[in-house]
Image (tube, coloured by chain):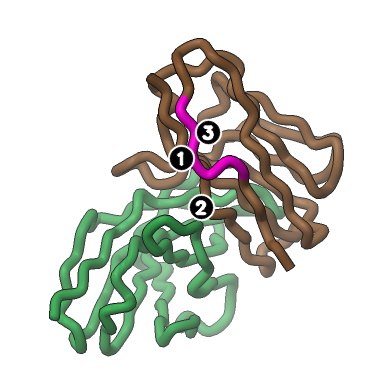
Amino acid sequence: NAGVTQTPKFQVLKTGQSMTLQCAQDMNHEYMSWYRQDPGMGLRLIHYSVGAGITDQGEVPNGYNVSRSTTEDFPLRLLSAAPSQTSVYFCASSYSNWDSPLHFGNGTRLTVT
Amino acid sequence: AQSVTQPDIHITVSEGASLELRCNYSYGATPYLFWYVQSPGQGLQLLLKYFSGDTLVQGIKGFEAEFKRSQSSFNLRKPSVHWSDAAEYFCAVGEGGYSTLTFGKGTMLLVSP
């Protein structure tokens, strides 16, 4: 049982480049989300999804796009990378009830130069 | 909007000593409260949660937390800290029907020999 798988683990981009961070889960979770973690800022929600075909914005959505075409996958797209998007990105999933803990991936460390 | 405050950015505790990490939240109704732990280079793992009922909840790894409505607090405690407890700890709050979690900024626990 792989849980939540994020790829790549590390990525360096130049300003203006685009890329997609991949997230896949094999637990049949309805809920998936993307957070970014910056020093002293905790985790901030970027986008989330409560099921295939349904996405919504979190606290810091600007500069990011998401889609949810399947239950398993929830990719995060950076449209035009900026140095302010240098961060560690975490994908998390759960069943859609408070009794279900969030399962986190191991993160993607992104540097934008 | 709900918010979570973890007043201590860093805490250093001697191995074998007791630990208390503070968490205060701002929310009108009864919140769903969580503590997560993050080891270096890893995603977050759920330690414990509170929804209702007994205000003292037990979690994994010997941790417990107490919900105090009058103080809007949900402090995490452990009677005797082990070196392996060194990590970053996050308090989180949810509200209403299942939706997103709001995380505090985290407290880094250092354990001295």
CB within 8 Å, label 3 to label 1: no
Q: Nearer the viewer, mark 1 or mark 2?
A: 1
Say what secondary structure mark 1 lies in. strand
Which region of the structure is painted magenta? A7-12
Which residue is at 38% across, 19% downward?
A113
The residue under label 1 is A109
Say what secondary structure mark 3 lies in. loop
Dots 3 and 1 on the same chain:
yes
When asked about the image quadrant of residue B9, the answer is bottom left
Mostly what secondary structure, the magenta segment? strand
Which residue is at 39% across, 72% downward?
B68
Which quadrant of the figure contains the C terminus of chain B?
A: bottom left
Q: Which chain is represented by brown in the image?
A: A
Which residue is at 56% across, 51% downward?
B101
> Left or right of B27: which side holds B20?
left
Relative vertical location of residue A18 with respect to residue A73 in this rendering, above or below: above
Magenta highlight on residue A10: yes
Q: Is residue B77 visible?
A: yes
Q: Which mark is residue A59?
A: 3
Q: Nearer the viewer, mark 3 or mark 2?
A: 3
